[in-house]
Amino acid sequence: MKDRLPLSKCFAAVDECGAPVVSVCGGEPTVYPRSSSWWRASSARKKHVIMCTNAILLDRFYKKARPHKRLSINVHLDGMQKTHDYVVDRTGVFDKAVAMIKEGKRLGYYVCTNTTVYRETDVARSRRCAPS
């Protein structure tokens, strides 16, 4: 936290790059107290913000922020429950992520996921879970 970039430099980079989309990745962006104000300022600059999160602190973000057409919540899942919790070395993280995905959708956020496939991943099971 002591080495974080000042918001003024973040906004300068957003303004300078000219890209229409800003992806905010980790660490974990929701750990920063000003994460909700950061995305609002970026969206005011007509940027679409994709906030990548492990969802552990997403409930805090939901309390501070509001759904917006320029905000996407991207929850990282490392496979199904057993694999995900093993990879992150913490029991219950998968269940929390799924709960936060459901809560985000209920609140009106655009929520998506991304997944890293590890050697521990049961590919056959993952294929059965994929929408057809």
Image (cartoon, rainbow, N blue to C red):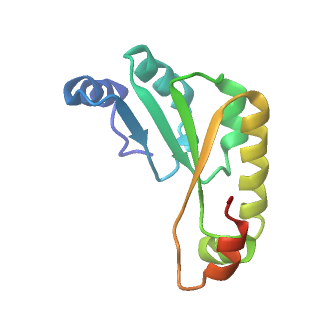
Is residue 87 or residue 7 the one in the foreground? Answer: 87
Q: Left or right: where does residue 50 sit relative to residue 16?
A: right
Res 69 visible: yes
Residue 78 versus residue 110 in the image, above or below: below
Name the residue: 32% across, 31% down. 10
Residue at the extreme front: 132
Q: Quadrant of residue 131?
A: bottom right
Is residue 8 or residue 83 the one in the foreground? Answer: 83
Name the residue: 53% across, 74% down. 117
- Where residue 59 appears, as percent x and y from the top left, is 73, 39
Residue 86 versus residue 111 in the image, above or below: below
Residue at the extreme top: 44
Q: Quadrant of residue 124?
A: bottom right
- Where residue 6 appears, as percent x and y from the top left, is 34, 31
Q: Quadrant of the C terminus?
A: bottom right
- Where residue 15 appears, as percent x and y from the top left, is 25, 22
- Where residue 68 appears, as percent x and y from the top left, is 59, 22
